Amino acid sequence: MKLDNVALLATAMTPFGKHPNKTLAELAVDAGLGVLREAGLDLRSVGEAYVASMLAPPMLGLHIMKQIGLTGLPVIAIESGSASGLIALREATYAVASGRCEVALALSYEHVMRPLGGSGGMMPGYESLMASPASFALWASRRMHERGTRQSHLGKLAAKNWNAARNNPLAIYRADHVVTAEEVLASPMVASPLTQMMGAPLCGGAAAALVASTDFVRRSRPNELVVRLLSTETVTETYDPGWIAVGPSVGPPEMTGAAARMAYESAGVGPEDLDFALVHDSWINEELEYYEQLGLCRPGDAEKLADEGATALGGRIPVNPDGGLVARGHAIGASGLAQIHEAWLQLRGRADKRQVTGARTALATLVGGGSVANVTLLQCDG
Amino acid sequence: MTKIAIEPGFLSIPDGSNDLPKLLGSRCTDCSTVFHPQRRVCLKCYSQLLNDVSLDGSGTLYACTHVNMKLRPGQRTTREYWVGHIDLDAGPRIQGILAPDIGTPEIGMRVTIALETLQVDGEGNETVVCHFRREDSK
């Protein structure tokens, strides 16, 4: 769906980390109040709220919103695995685009220490038997067989994200030294060829975005750059002969490609227009797959992109300048709106040491287990 | 003392000790596509006329990884393991664990199904899962 009158009004996020002394609700309220403060509003200006998490207990979203205000607004809870935050943004965007309200809130939160004692048992026995890293390691195994991908390519990309996070004060990992591919490769093996430093740490955190009509944003923030939402497209799996029915599967990678094609078409922009991208990297080989799926390079050239450093800050198309899931951290349902917070900072020229020079057009994408993929395109006016 | 599959609906357990387990699946009566596990609707042509079928567990390894984490039925741990995608001769591509003595598997190798006991309760009942071993091994 083409969007022509929707923009970000504000974003906010908490640090991503373990947060042993905060409850999930406290984190969520921090982000919810934070985004309202950033916009100079209170909840009375918000027409609808979309709250998202993968692991939150039932009814928590309503409870959280009651701590932010009692205006009687509709509150709709969303769970779409790791993609939950971007799906909440999608719904907030369509709430504004449809004319139902002028301002909508997307609020996402996750805490992996408190609300659950372990994520096993989420699915029936057969489905949860195998650890989820295996799914992505199997992608990597096949890609290495077909394309000659080397483990060193994965090491380089993970090191890129670790080093990006050194300049992100909200990241869970901020290494005190330049991380090398060799260091990534030397970390403990999790599922061959994937080592521990190639995988995202599951952590806690919250992030939020306010979406409004472009007119509302211009009135609220006169003389400021407007970050427009060009498109947000979501897909789930389609059948093909290689479809895997069983296991904690995400994918196939072509899902992201399908969502990207839809998003580019809706927005009237193409991959050549992007200045940077925020890409799902719960395991780093996903980032490699998505370079091709998103059209950042031709099919078969992703390893070349890695070798050339083209996706590092200062390269042709920076990917995950905030450190990505691998090093900024993966607060599961909150990671999508953390990407949107990064896009908001970058597109308004406020990303400090990790600023992508002249950034005007951005892509954010996540996949969620189950599985689902979303691609969102944003562009700064002026 | 009986063998019980970790979850019903995936596997048939043979009576004779020399017989191989079968994978439970569905075949679409309209387009002949075969699925594992069983489906109520054909995901290719949307027919709801599917027959239950038992599938031979022989096939070709499509991808594999060695997982340095414990295999977990629920939260219980047993062993580290190889896991693979297997293109069954019967049609579907499936995900399955590989036998503990698989060695270093190679993509393209032939594999076949066998039973593995995950745990035994106080009465001698075994919780079992299927795994895939080299086709030429015992």
Image (tube, coloured by chain):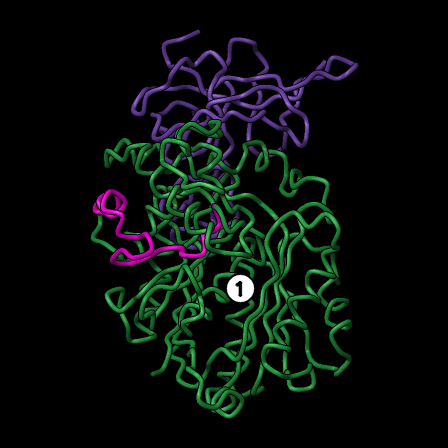
Chain colours: A green, B purple
Q: Chain of mark 1?
A: A
Residue drawn where x is 64% and y is 23% of the image:
B77
Tell me where residue A78 sits by quadrant. Answer: bottom right
Reading the image, the residue beneath label 1 is: A337
- In this orientation, which residue lies closer to the viewer: A267 or B136? A267
Q: Main secondary structure of the magenta part?
A: loop
Image side of residue A164 versus residue B119, left or right: left
The C terminus of chain A sits in image quarter: bottom left
Q: Of B9 and A309, which appears nearest the observer?
A: A309
Q: Total number of numbered labels? A: 1
Q: Is residue A325 above or below residue B120?
A: below
Q: Which residues are magenta?
A: A301-326
Q: Amino acid at mark 1?
A: Leu
Classify A327 as above or below A12: above
Whole-percent x, y for residue A49 in the image: 64, 75
Residue closer to the observer: A129 or A93: A93
For the N terminus of chain A, give its image quadrant. Answer: bottom left
Mark 1 neighbour class, 10 Å CA radius: few under 14, some 14 to 19, many 20 or more: many
Against A346, residue A224 (above or below) is below
What's the residue at 43%, 16% (across, down)?
A: B133
Judged left or right of residue A191, residue A78 is right
Whether residue A322 appears in magenta in the rendering, the answer is yes
Relative depth, front residue between A159 and A95: A159
Residue B119 location (% of width, % of height): 67, 18
Instruction: Give how far across and how far down residue A296 sits, in percent.
Output: 27, 57
Residue A234 belongs to the span the image colors magenta: no
Q: Is residue B57 left or right of residue A66?
A: left
Q: What is the residue that sits farthest to the top in this orientation?
A: B138
Which residue: 56% across, 60% down?
A84
